[in-house]
Image (cartoon, rainbow, N blue to C red):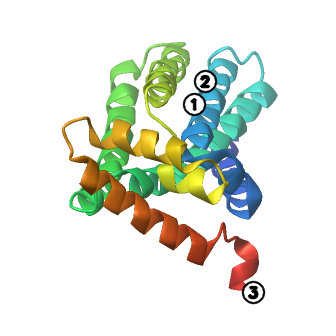
Amino acid sequence: QQGLVVSISLAGALVASAVAAIKLGATLGGKWELQLAACFYALGALCMGAAPTLIFLLLGRFTYGLGIGFAMHAAPMYIAETSPPSVRGLLISLKECFIVSGILLGYLGSYVINGDEGGWRTLLYSSLVFSAILAAGMLTLPNSPRWLLQRGRPTTEARTALIRLRGQKVALEVIEAELTTMIIASEKAGIGGVGELL
């Protein structure tokens, strides 16, 4: 039973990653896919923390795993599409650093509740805080300009998103040059998909 509880979240992550890679990721875009991940995180945490039976605990773990899968698919894509080229690699590496830090926090949390009957529920509920931070943070960010262009949205919408990402202090010529590069790349690449691998 312990092995099943631990591993079923990976099954959820696998399902979500496959669904996102095939179609949903390109349809939603990184911003809304991360919002979806936050919803699954929260729903999974609630289900796990309140689980009256093993079945509910497993359902919560699977749901939480769906959040993991969507987040792991969307986060590097969103970072790559929205960050300036000069710091893109650093930001993607920082994502990995935060993942490892989260795992470490989980171990520390388990150490703290060790011996506390019912403490595991508190630990599982605690991920609600992080899912709320993710959801609130993504609400403040725009859609990826590259994704907007690939979905056929107006260039003005992509320009507005890029200005929000780069800040008002960046010269308009720099914004226009980056936007032009994105337009050319989008026209060449299209949306893509799994079919291109076959």
Query: Which residue does the numbered mark 2 point to in the structure image?
Result: 42
The residue at which mark 1 appears reads as 38
Say if 120 sits above or below 184 in the image: above
C-beta proximity under 8 Å, tags 1 and 2: yes
Tag 3: Cα neighbours inside 10 Å, few (<14), some, or many (≥20)? few
In what element is the residue under mark 3? Answer: loop
Dot 1 amino acid type = Ala
Looking at marks 3 and 1 on the same chain, the residue that comes earlier in the sequence is marked by 1
- Residue 177, percent across and down? 32, 62
Q: Which picture quadrant has residue 189?
A: bottom right
Residue 54: percent from left, percent from top: 76, 28
For label 2, the crowd category at 10 Å Cα-Cα, with few meaning under 14, some 14 to 19 and many 20 or more, is many
Type of amino acid at the residue the image marks with label 2: Ala
Residue at coordinates 76% horizontally, 33% vertically from top-left? 59
Observer-side mark, 3 or 1, equals 3
Placement of 87 over or under 114, stated as above or below: below
Q: SS class of the residue under badge 1? A: helix
Distance between the Cα atoms at labels 3 and 1? 32 Å
Q: Quadrant of the C terminus?
A: bottom right
Locate residue 29, reporting x and y percent: 61, 48
Q: CA distance from mark 2 to mark 3?
A: 36 Å
Q: Position of residue 46 (x, y in %)?
A: 65, 18
86 or 101: nearer the viewer: 86
Which amino acid, mark 3?
Leu
Q: Nearer the viewer, mark 2 or mark 3?
A: 3
| Residue beneath disc 3 | 198
